[in-house]
Image (cartoon, rainbow, N blue to C red):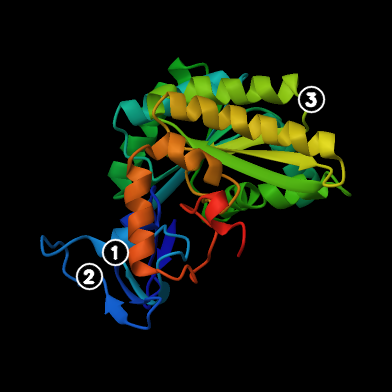
């Protein structure tokens, strides 16, 4: 999540929009306009409506204004690439960094197949190895100390190559490669559709979850690759799917279902940031239990006619069949 202020200051922090939004102006279904909070650094007044609306996928109101937190540009920004022989080792290293409390700003996993696609797409020459991309910010001494601590941890977990990236241009190239991964994947599979799914699990369960995803790709003979924000337990699987082949679509659905089943079994969530929409609506009851009825009551209170993005998020399929 990146937030940019009027002064141009930019920050990147882990977490969803809920952690960055201070207040919203929202138009409700009946036309009322409300503001959900203040610009104070903290408040104990009233219910936390801001966090209720953020993430509601347009089902509770329409945002017309929002205020976000911004941070100043730090003195130093350092980055690094850590290559491994296996995804298991990369995930274990990420888990070790988080477990040790090293203040890493960005911690991304890119699986080996993705670098093959990225190199062809962006004309780069990254090694075809499971890789962690890391970023540290703060004072020069602080950022350097954090990077050194992370290096010690990843080397203990089997890192084969650890490359510091201090030059701003090289950092930009590294992160551009990560951000172009989806486009590179699509370019490598012309004529096929790109289906992406995600789950989020507790950090302690991340290694097992990623391992299961890799195994499912092999078992179901799906063309896919894994990347993710492993610093917060959220990872994504990109799949190349023929949208005109029911068997191919069924395999993709089966793989997504397996990921969700395991995530829920370890107290994770069916989606860390992709959202529910209608694709993962079926999992809401299993994930939330009796809480889902409370969510539906809130929806009915704020949108009694069901006119705001109907059929999404918490709506049951039977409730929207005739819309």
What residue appears at the point 63 percent right and 34 percent down from the top-left corner? Answer: 256
Which of the 4 quarters of the picture holds residue 94? top left
Give the secondary structure at mark 3: loop
Give the secondary structure at mark 2: loop
Residue 161: where, in percent of width, then height?
Answer: 57, 26
Whether residue 231 is visible to the viewer of this picture, yes or no, is: no
Disc assigned to residue 233:
none
What residue appears at the point 54 percent right and 32 percent down from the top-left corner? Answer: 260
Which of the 4 quarters of the picture holds residue 124? top right
- Nearer-the-camera pick, 296 or 202: 296
Q: CA distance from mark 3 to mark 2?
A: 49 Å
Q: Mark 1 — residue? A: 50
Residue 185: where, in percent of width, then height?
Answer: 75, 45
* Residues at marks 1 and 2 touching, judged by CB atoms closer than 8 Å: yes
Q: Mark 3 — residue? A: 221
Of labels 3 and 2, earlier in sequence is 2
Residue 21: where, in percent of width, then height?
Answer: 32, 64
* Residues at marks 1 and 3 touching, judged by CB atoms closer than 8 Å: no
Disc assigned to residue 37:
2
């Amino acid at each position: 999540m990146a937030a940019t202020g009027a002064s141009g200051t930019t920050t990147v922090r882990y977490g969803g929009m809920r952690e960055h939004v201070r207040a919203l102006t929202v138009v409700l279904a009946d036309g009322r306009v409300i503001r959900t909070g203040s610009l104070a650094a903290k408040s104990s007044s009233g219910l936390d409506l801001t966090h209720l609306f953020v993430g509601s996928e347009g089902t509770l109101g329409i945002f017309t204004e929002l205020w976000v937190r911004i941070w100043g540009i730090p003195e130093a920004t350092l980055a690094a690439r850590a290559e491994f022989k296996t995804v298991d080792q990369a995930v274990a290293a990420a888990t070790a960094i988080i477990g040790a409390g090293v203040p890493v700003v960005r911690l991304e996993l890119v699986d080996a197949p993705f670098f093959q696609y990225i190199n062809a797409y962006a004309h780069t020459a990254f090694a075809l190895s499971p890789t962690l991309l890391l970023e540290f910010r703060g004072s020069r001494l602080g950022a350097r100390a954090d990077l050194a601590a992370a290096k010690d941890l990843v080397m203990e977990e089997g890192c084969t190559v650890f490359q510091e990236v201090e030059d701003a241009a090289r950092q930009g190239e590294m992160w551009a490669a990560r951000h172009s991964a989806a486009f590179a994947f699509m370019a490598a599979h012309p004529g096929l559709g790109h289906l992406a799914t995600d789950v989020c699990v507790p950090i302690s369960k991340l290694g097992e979850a990623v391992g299961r995803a890799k195994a499912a790709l092999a078992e179901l003979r799906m063309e896919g690759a894994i990347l993710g924000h492993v610093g917060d337990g959220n990872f994504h699987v990109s799949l190349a799917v023929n949208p005109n082949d029911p068997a191919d679509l069924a395999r993709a659905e089966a793989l997504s279902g397996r990921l969700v089943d395991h995530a829920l079994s370890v107290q994770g969530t069916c989606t860390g940031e992709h959202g529910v929409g209608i694709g993962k609506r079926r999992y809401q009851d299993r994930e939330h239990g009796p809480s889902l009825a409370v969510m539906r009551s809130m929806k009915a209170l704020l949108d009694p006619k069901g006119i705001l993005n109907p059929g999404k998020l918490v709506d049951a399929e039977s409730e929207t069949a005739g819309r």
